[in-house]
Image (tube, helix red, strand yellow):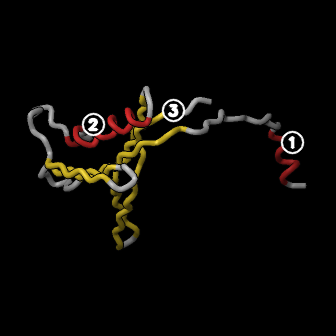
Amino acid sequence: MTHSWYVLLEEHTVESQRVETHAFELHQWRLTSSRHVEGDRQEAEQAAEDLAFHYIPSRMQRPSRPEDRPARAVFRSSDGAYLVTLDDGRYEGEHRLRITVAELVHTEERVVGPRESVGKTIRRLFS
């Protein structure tokens, strides 16, 4: 298998939930995009940098005012990953992105085993 280079885009999300009288916020990173890059690691790193400096999440885009751009801070960590903060001044507050370059080193197709009949499954479970 030849190894392929990808740019991975993760977005920080916050989900609010209520349980009885308590409110909780669940913070997590979600992989929102994996973009295959034709070429070598250097080209993938260039694509990641371009994404870090120019990507705007769809929820921050305003079709009525396409010239608006959010405030942006781009940090590059020692391993070459980017952490980007965006703030458009609206009530949602700061939006965070994590952009990394990754080499795909293994893939495997899903294997579906033979299905047994419902009767056989019941007999197996209760024997």
Residue for badge 2: 50
Q: Name the residue tied to disc 1.
A: 120
- Up the image or down, 43 lies above or below 13; here it is above
**Residue indicated by mark 3:** 4
- Determine the secondary structure under disc 1: helix
Please indicate whether residue 67 sits to the left or right of residue 42 in the image.
left
Q: In front: mark 1 or mark 3?
A: 3
Residue type indicated by callout 1:
Lys
Q: Earlier in the sequence, mark 3 or mark 2?
A: 3
On the image, the x and y values in percent for residue 114 come to 80, 34
Three-letter code, disc 3: Ser
Q: Is residue 118 left or right of residue 50?
A: right
Judged by depth in the image, the label closer to the viewer, 2 or 1, is 2
The residue at the point 34 percent across, 60 percent down is 16
Distance between the alpha carbons at the discs numbered 2 and 1: 56 Å
| Residue 24 horizontal/vertical position (percent) | 36, 67
Q: Residue furthest bottom?
A: 21
Q: Would residue 52 appear left or right of 19 to someone viewing this image?
A: left
Evaluate if marks 3 and 2 touch, with contact meaning CB atoms under 8 Å apart.
no
> Exactly how many numbered labels are in the figure?
3
**Crowd rating for badge 1 (residues with CA inside 10 Å; few <14, some 14–19, many 20+):** few
Report crowding for label 2: few under 14, some 14 to 19, many 20 or more residues within 10 A (C-alpha).
few
Q: Residue at x 23, y 50 (%)?
A: 74
Give residue 68's position: percent from left, percent from top: 9, 39
How far, Cα to Cα, is label 1 from label 3?
44 Å
- Quadrant for the N terminus, please: top right
Q: Neighbour class for label 3 at 10 Å: few (<14), some, many (≥20)? A: some
The tag earlier along the polypeptide, 1 or 3, is: 3
Q: Secondary structure at mark 3?
A: strand
Extreme-right residue of the structure: 127
Q: Amino acid at mark 2?
A: Asp
Q: Is residue 113 left or right of residue 33?
A: right
